[in-house]
Amino acid sequence: MIHSVRANHSGFREVGFTSGVNLILADRSKAAGDKDTTNALGKSTLIDIIDFCLGSNAAPGKGLRVEALQGWAFTLKLDVAGQAVAVTRATDTPGVVAIEGVTKGWGWQPSPNQDGALTLDIKRWRAVLAWAMFGLSESATERGYRPSVRSLLSYFNRNKSAAYNTPFKYFDNQKTWDVQIHNAFLLGLDWEKAATWQQLKDQKNAFDALKQAIKTGAIDGELASLGELEAERLRLLTQLEREQAELSSFRVLPQYREIEVQANALTADIHRLVNANIADKRRLERYREVVTQEGSPTDDRLELLYQEAGVALPGLVVKTLADAREFNEKIVVNRREFIAGEVAALEASIEERNTVIATLTLRRGEYLSVLAGQGALDELTQLQVLHAATRLKVDDLTNRIDQLRQMTSRVDTIKVETVELKRATERDYQERRDLWSQALSLFSDFSEHLYKTPGRLVIDIDDTGYRFDVEIAGSPSEGISKMKIFCYDLMLVSFARQRGLGIDFLVHDSTIFDGVDPRQRAHALELASAMAQKYGFQYICTLNTDMIPTNDFTAGFDFESLVRLRLTDTNPSGSLLGFRY
């Protein structure tokens, strides 16, 4: 049970609690103006303080760890393992809590700090709460898919608006495994089955991701199947054999580069001689064409030329026609003798070059014969490098194929294990019927107390694990949706007390009654009072006074006796902290 909440600042409105129903009211005073509000008086802050002292996460700049609350420390007095202790947690040093009271029997004992106060680090404080309230023996540092005291406490102290959207979650993005494990634990089901389910899901997801990575990473581009990977390996093996054959027949010639240079030089010389022959052959063709086509001028032509010369050059001394004919014949003879000499010289040069070309070609052939089937050392090294790279590709691809085969086999095994797990969970579900049926009966009774028709708490088992639902007639309305959560939470704390768990309080913000019909509000508060007395727990709820269904309470229900603190909007001193921020 929670006994009280206080702080280290005098302006704080200390509040004490008793067993049964405890109400914190936010009053709208008569003197308040139309711009005053009851929304910033500290109702939700009180719930945050309780959660803070129960070891909630405390990120800088959020919740109580804001600049306005620097230097503040809050103290929660509550029962832990049957003994009243006071736990103090400061906003400036949220990693530790100070403990006052009897701690005998705790698995983690507080130790004195430099000021002499007995302290526990926050992890060990959570471990103490896990043991005392839920019987969990986990160590303070243990991790994995298992019930967490912080998650479990979130169902008994819903301190965020998102916690009032569905009975089975305390925040919107809560993981499926988190929902399954913690609700299974609270409903008396085998939470370890839910944990195993998630482990199988993780393995399958990991294998699927790795399988895809292996496919796309085996070679350039994507391979869609194991068969394609095998085909690629076969191609590489063929390439590997071909490269091995080339290496086996390769011979290293030490003078390879020198001979290669000489062969290349011979080739250049041959090309130069061949080009020279081509040029000379073209000149021969031109000379032969001139000899064939050129003839002596005729007498008529000479006479015509002579007459034209005489007319063109009057007064000049000209030779006779016979002299001209003799002179022309000498020119033709001389020209033909010159061309004949040039032709003979070109033919001789061409023949000489042909002889040299034949000699050089023979010598180059001898060099190439030496190089055939042999190579330089650097060529051998390059072949070996390429061969080693191909072998690495083959080995890597073989490993990937083996991994893919193993993973495919493991995925099939996971499918079988999932089916077997579902069967085992269904058997366990039937074996635990006497236990979880109590939770279902409590929910049905509580919902029937609020509405004419009893609601149903549904527990199903499908291929993904436990699946939970609640049904109350008219549930699409906001008010009835909130009452689903109220009935579920009231069932959880009542069922926990029936099972002998140490958790003995339930805390709700005024959000739980948003949109709820005044008659159901009255029934809910009366039901909480009756069940708290019957099962020995404490119900704490914050409300605005305009939400109190005064006219709908049963005669004799003393509502005023349940009020532990009234917050007012008259001035800042009427708020929980004594100031507003």
Image: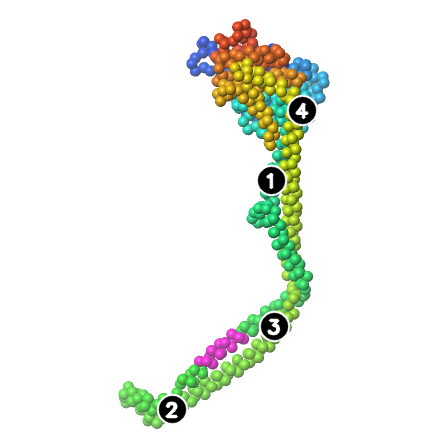
Q: At which x and y percent is residue 223?
A: 58, 47
Using the image, determine if residue 177 lies above or below residue 349.
above
Few, some or many residues within 10 Å of mark 2 (<14, 14–19, 20+): few
Badge number at residue 208:
1
- Sequence-earlier tag: 1 or 4: 1
Is label 1 or label 2 in front?
A: 1
Q: Is residue 306 above or below residue 245?
A: below
Residue 395 placed where, x, y %?
A: 66, 50
Tell me how far mark 2 sits from mark 4, CA to CA.
142 Å
Rendered image quadrant of residue 24: top right
Can residue 567 be seen by looking at this rendering? no
Q: Quadrant of the N terminus?
A: top right
Q: Disc 2 marks which amino acid? A: Phe
Q: Which residue is mark 2?
A: 327
Can you tell which of label 1 and label 4 is closer to the viewer? 4
Circle 3 residue? 364
